[in-house]
Image (tube, rainbow, N blue to C red):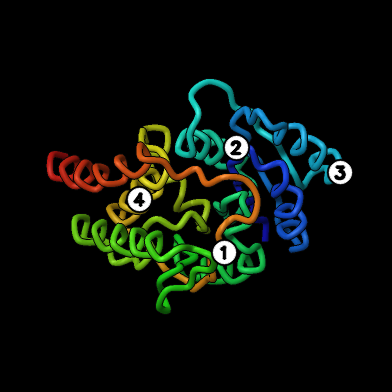
Amino acid sequence: MNILVVVPTYNERENLPLLAAGVLKHDGVRMLVVDDDSPDGTGAIADQLAREHPGRVEVMHRTGIRGLGRSYVDGLLHALKEGTADFICQMDADLSHNPDYLPELVGAAATYDLVIGSRYLKGVSVVNWPLHRIILSALGNRYIRLITNLATSDCTSGFRCWRREALSRLPIAGMVSDGYAFLVEMLYNAKTLGLRIGEVPIIFVERRQGQSKLSSTVLLESLVMPWRLVFRGSNS
């Protein structure tokens, strides 16, 4: 199998080498690092990894409007245009997503079009989060499911594996949201298209290095996006 892992980065110079080591230990797995013009030199670290692992690490340097959603749009479109990967995965660069779960996600993609690494499939599987963050995330997922009628237990997880042909059906270029809202938008589009969506349990570990990208703007967009999706669907 040919597996491509798309990893957006912004100020992740300490974490990226560790993540790459974990990802590349799996046979048949490659990485596309989409660096958002990180001021801490993450892009240079990614370039060094590409030189050390030719054919297995590729780097895309983005400029202009920053954001997780914009990075994923560019990275996923590039992965689809390349056209060689059987499975395309998404994961965070901050080591909160353990690369050891990749074989399990890809294995489940033999049955599903999209597989999500879920923090909430078996209770709450989160390490090093304060209680208020757990409550916020759990209530946020319940809020999203209530409005959108999604059945997925973890709608905002960024650890995902897509079958390439399924991902190619999504209107990726037309997505305008960012942060967690982008992840919800992708999931909702997958459901609308009738794609088979599955989940596997993971243990999520809060970042060890750097700062969280969570902001009030990201949270506000996450509150508004489910309503946008529903209203857009009712008017289409």
Binning the other alpha carbons within 10 Å of mark 4 as few (below 14), some (14 to 19) or many (20 upward) gives: many
* Residue 152 at x, y percent in the picture: 34, 65
Q: Secondary structure at mark 4?
A: helix
Q: Which residue is mark 3?
A: 52
Q: Residue at x 71, y 47 (%)?
A: 16
Amino acid beneath label 1? Val
Q: Quadrant of residue 102?
A: bottom right
Binning the other alpha carbons within 10 Å of mark 3 as few (below 14), some (14 to 19) or many (20 upward) gives: few
Q: Quadrant of residue 41?
A: top right
**Mark nearer the N terminus (2 vs 3):** 2
Q: Secondary structure at mark 2?
A: loop
Evaluate if marks 1 and 3 touch, with contact meaning CB atoms under 8 Å apart. Answer: no
Q: Which residue is mark 2?
A: 10
**Mark nearer the N terminus (3 vs 4):** 3
Residue depth check, mark 2 versus mark 3: number of the one nearer the observer: 2
Q: Residue at x 86, y 43 (%)?
A: 52
Q: Quarter holding the N terminus?
A: bottom right
Q: Which residue is mark 1?
A: 205
